[in-house]
Amino acid sequence: MKLLLTNIKELVQVREVAPNKVSGADMKTLPTLKNAFLYVENGRIANFGNMADMPEYAGFKTIDCTDKMVLPAWCDSHTHLVYAGNREQEFVDRIHGLTYQEIAQKGGGILNSAKKLQETDETELYEQSAARLREVMRLGTAAIEIKSGYGLTTEAELKMLRVAKKLGNHYGITVRTTFLGAHAVPSEFKNDKAGYIDLICNEMLPKVASEGLADYVDVFCEDGYFSVADTERILSEAKKYKLIPKIHVNQFTALGGIQAAVDHDALSVDHLEVLTEADISALKDTNTMPVALPSCSYFLGIPYTPGRQLIDAGLPLALATDYNPGSTPSGNMNFVVSTACIKMRLTPEEAINAATINGAYAMGLSDSHGSITKGKIANLIVTKPIPSYGFLPYAFGSNLIDLVFIKGKEVS
Ligand code: NIG
Ligand code: FE
């Protein structure tokens, strides 16, 4: 299958040799090519360059991109896209004054979603999740990480991961899966957290690993959920199965979980709304990617991750949605990119780097995703006619995407 895009006003995130991530001051640079063509063969980027240098291509689908931008599709490295039902009532409860933590303490929150998910059969769970996936694909996401964590029983956790895998196989989008059994302590173990952690270590992890259902392991390291010591125990156990950590940490409290994650070679640490100087130092000169989730801050009205400070400290930053029913019922990466500029003071260049190449890194996909580089998978966004790529975050709330290609195939 071949595809040619011509007269592209600006081809964005062009990297002859792609770095695996961009950090600090380098995030300000977003290389582009004006008046460009892009040629796709067998789902991969086969060639690109200036229109003036375009070879004679003929006999296949050509799309004229006059006045339009072309970017690598978004890489969303943190979602809980597989879930059942919604938590609209909790949203209203928060409007009336309850906090996210108060709702959770009353048995709402993650436990509410776990109950719904346990009662939903696998086919129904697949259908509900597929509808969300189709929506985010149309919004320009072409690689996505999906976590378990609303099962909280062995069977229900496996069910979530099977659904996530099936979605990737069916829709052709790259899906990376993460086992998040340690998302909350289920009610059956209310007074026996250690017993639940034993279940995770002795039953869930071995099954998840033997069925090859997860690439990563996650823990919600937070007051009232899992302590740093709990986190370390689970990460050490997961290491035996070669599951790499990606951790929910510092959402509401700085407990020292970032240092623990770094010590366990975490691929990413996610949330980071509350950060200490020690946390920032812990991340320096490591391979761990900080991931900010600004839609979660927006929806819950909590602080935004100090992305400006992280980048100014020389660190890399990735942006992701956190799509989930409780804290972020949105999988829209365009909104994430806008919000990072508006609320976290990232420049458009930094935000686009964070949502493409650095997002790919946070899923272990930088070799094949996240930039316009020959040989990489042809996951592409073609915008509507816009004056510049900076118009994307500026005109927040508008859908400026015209076409999306995943593996060179148009998303309809
Ligand atoms: O990333 N913080 C933990 N987990 C999810 C939300 C869970 C929920 O409320 O359902 C998050 O925000
Ligand atoms: Fe999350």
Image (cartoon, helix red, strand yellow):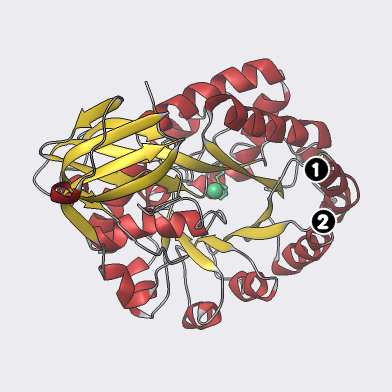
Q: Residue at x 48, y 65 (%)?
A: 20
- Name the foreground residue: 206 vs 65: 65
User: Which numbered disc flags the more N-terminal residue, 1 or 2?
Assistant: 1
Callout 2 amino acid: Tyr
Contact (Cβ within 8 Å) of mark 1 with mark 2:
yes
Mark 2 lies on a secondary structure that is loop
Location of residue 174 (image quadrant): top right
Q: Residue at x 36, y 75 (%)?
A: 24
Q: Position of residue 224 (x, y in %)?
A: 66, 56
- Residue at the limit of the structure toward the right, as seen here: 202
* Number of residues whose C-alpha sits closer than 10 Å to that of mark 2, classed few (under 14), some (14–19) or many (20 or more): some
Quadrant (top left/top right/bottom left/bottom right) for the C terminus: top left
Location of residue 379 (image quadrant): top left
**Res 241 label:** 2
Mark 1 lies on a secondary structure that is helix
Q: Give the Cα distance between marks 1 and 2.
A: 9 Å
Does residue 275 appear to the left or right of 148 in the view shown? left
Does residue 11 appear to the left or right of 87 in the view shown? left
- Name the foreground residue: 71 vs 336: 71
Q: Position of residue 382 (x, y in %)?
A: 25, 37
Q: Position of residue 354 (x, y in %)?
A: 37, 59
Residue ID for mark 1: 208
